[in-house]
Image: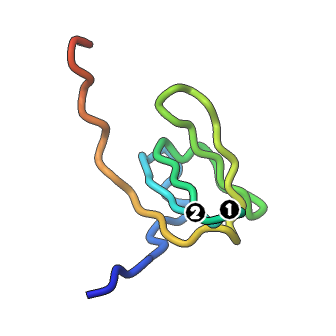
Amino acid sequence: MAARLVIAITSHDIGARITTRRRVPGGFSDAVGVLVSWSDGLLKVRKRDGTVVEIPEETLVAAKVVPAAPPRPGRM
């Protein structure tokens, strides 16, 4: 059974935690974080470390909303 790549997010998912896979030179790259904006064909995703990844919409091959990250051990 082959994996099926689906883009299952829209601009209505701004504020949700998402995972993405996009084409980059030499392969693919993944980003997980909060979708902070999506306009003019550019998605911005804030990762856990606070950095913002800009993803051109045309490079997306898969994306979906995911649950909140579990708490890190020792951090309450």
Q: Position of residue 76 (x, y in %)?
A: 23, 12
Residue designated by label 2: 28
Q: Is residue 72 above or below residue 13?
A: above
Residue 24, which numbered label?
1
The residue closer to the viewer here, 26 or 28, is 26
Disc 1 secondary structure class? strand
Q: Does the CB distance between marks 1 and 2 fall below 8 Å? A: yes
The quarter in which the N terminus is drawn is bottom left
Question: At 31% across and 40% down in the image, what residue appears?
Answer: 68
Q: Quadrant of residue 51?
A: top right
- Location of residue 18 with respect to 6 vertically, above or below: above
Query: Could you say where residue 60 lies in the image, as x and y percent from the top left?
Result: 60, 68
Give the crowd class for mark 2: few <14, some 14-19, many >=20 residues within 10 Å: few
Please tell me how crowded label 1 is: few (under 14), some (14-19), or many (20+) other residues with Cα within 10 Å. Answer: few
Q: Number of callouts in the render? A: 2
Q: Position of residue 61 (x, y in %)?
A: 55, 72
Residue sitting at the far right: 40
